[in-house]
Amino acid sequence: MLPDNVLLEIFHFYRDDPSSWISFNVTTFWKWQPLTQVCRRWRYIVLGSPRRLDLRVVCTDKTSTRTLLDIWPTFPIGIFCLQMVDKKGIENITVALEHRDRTSDIYISRINGSALEKLATSTLMHEPFPALRSFVLRSSDDSVPVLPETFLGGSAPHLQLFDLSGIPFPTFPQFILTATHIKNLHLTDIPHSGYISPDVMATRLITLPNLEYLDIGFRSPLSRPLQISPPRLTHAVLPALTHLVFSGVSEYFEDFVARIDTPLLYQLSATFFLDLIFDIPRLHDFINRTESLGPSTQAEMVFSGQLIKITLGSPIRFELEIKCERPDWQLSSMIQIFGQQLPHLSHIEHLEIRENTSASMKCKDDPDMDSLQWLELFCLFIAVQSLYVSENLVPPVAAALQELTGGMAIEVLPALHNLSLEGLEPSGHVQEGIQSFVMARQLFGRPVIVVGPTLSEEDAIKVKRLQNALAARRSRKRKLEYQRELEDAIEAERKDMEMWRERTLVLEALLSNSTLE
């Protein structure tokens, strides 16, 4: 028979197995209860090691919380509600909150206005939560109350994840003064009643030295600063931040990024409401002083029914979206933003332009998407060597390229040599427009190979040669990447073997001390 300490070590190994976890989006807990049902001895070992095994009691708005808490010892409590929580469900949640000194996780993904009113006004939510590690509260209801300053007792010293969506909490900047261990912060779909100025936001975030992921999003374009403050000589440093996500008006983002420095930032994502004028020089400055957001060689632009999005880098380092339904406004907004000397596009070598299904017919039939707009866009991509255009965007792009005659043919997209057009027909006005562009480029010694479903024999040979050259480059790149991956995998295996060797030695010692073979 194995001794207790060996069984405990085995249980701890089992806890590390992902198959024993239950995931609630942003947090997980493991299913330890089945171990207690095997035999009395196993139950004694498991329940006797709550810290080592990270035992938590999970309550929901549907379970009989009081009965559940009576069954198990005083372990940390996790409250998880994945379905819509109504007033009746709040009663079970309230029972769990009576033990706020044990409450480690609160996850409520959907709650209506009346239930939130009942929860927010409960005296239990106005007391400190000393053990709380993660807090998620989301609502899509338009009639939700403003969370008071005393929410969560104004104190959660061990909080690491805070996620609030669709709920106004204007005094949040005061709250984080007592929650300085936050690593992941999500304040999304903020109603106008919960507006927090960029000055206050940046100033308060300094108190979060461990902040790694920041997501700020406003519901309405009304949530904007009255005026953008003058440039600052010093910036608030967010030393651990790797991901920054924003959604709102560009003026707010401009003011905010002008106040911060993020030396470790790995990915930047911004979504702007449509504006008549986009004036974003401070975004340019922010990108320039953030080393990891350096130039990219790949870009993808996607038109959709509600917005236009451009992503740069692989993996993605920079992402920009404009909320707008009209394709011509989508395109003009991108031209206006990236025309302000943003350093990204001048290094792009591979560009894809596509639309999703909801935007296909809009882009294809929109009379306001004129050739001039497309040419203004292409003028920004001075280093693009390969261009891919999806089927429904081929006609307007072909019409624009047909306008390039004489020297203009090499001034726009000067480095282009591979043009891939999805669904290009062998004849017709679209084919004529493309051939006109190809001939103009040929005259000036800048040939372009058109890749489509049908090609002449000569073009097919050129395409084949180009494909072979590109394939050789990709092969060399893959070999280098594969070599690096192998080296990393070998190192990981070595560390893993060392870890298991140490654990084996521990178990052997335990068995030896127990006089077992």
Image: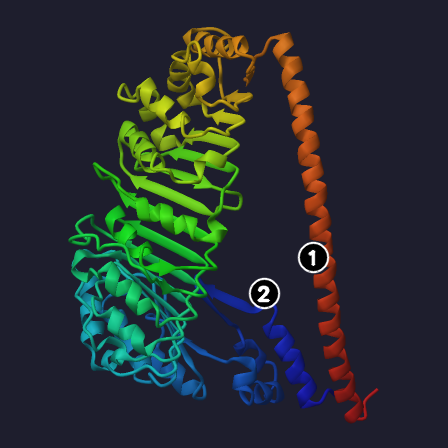
Query: Which residue position holds label 1?
Result: 488
- Mark 1 nearby-residue class (10 Å; few <14, some 14–19, many ≥20): few
Residue 455 position, x and y percent, is 58, 11
Q: Closer to the camera, 95 or 364?
A: 364
- Mark 2 nearby-residue class (10 Å; few <14, some 14–19, many ≥20): few
Q: Residue at x 46, y 8 (%)?
A: 436
Which of the 4 image quarters holds residue 404?
top left
SS for dot 1: helix
Q: Closer to the camera, 259 or 506?
A: 259
Amino acid type of disc 2? Ser
Look at the image and tell me in which quarter the C terminus lies: bottom right
Q: Closer to the camera, 480 or 515?
A: 480
Total numbered labels: 2
Amino acid type of disc 1? Asp
Numbered mark located on residue 6 in the image: none
Q: In whole angstroms, how far apart are the C-alphas of marks 1 and 2? A: 25 Å
Residue 152 drawn above or below residue 318:
below
Mark 1 or mark 2: name the one nearer the start of the chain: 2
Labels 1, 2: front one: 1
Look at the image and tell me in which quarter the N terminus lies: bottom right
**Cβ–Cβ below 8 Å for labels 1 and 2?**
no
SS for dot 2: helix
Which of the 4 image quarters holds residue 190?
bottom left
Residue 311 position, x and y percent, is 44, 41
Residue 152 drawn above or below residue 423:
below
Q: Is residue 92 visible?
A: no
Residue 498 drawn above or below residue 516:
above
Q: Residue at x 26, y 21 (%)?
A: 368
Query: Which residue position holds label 2?
Result: 19
Residue 62 position, x and y percent, is 34, 70
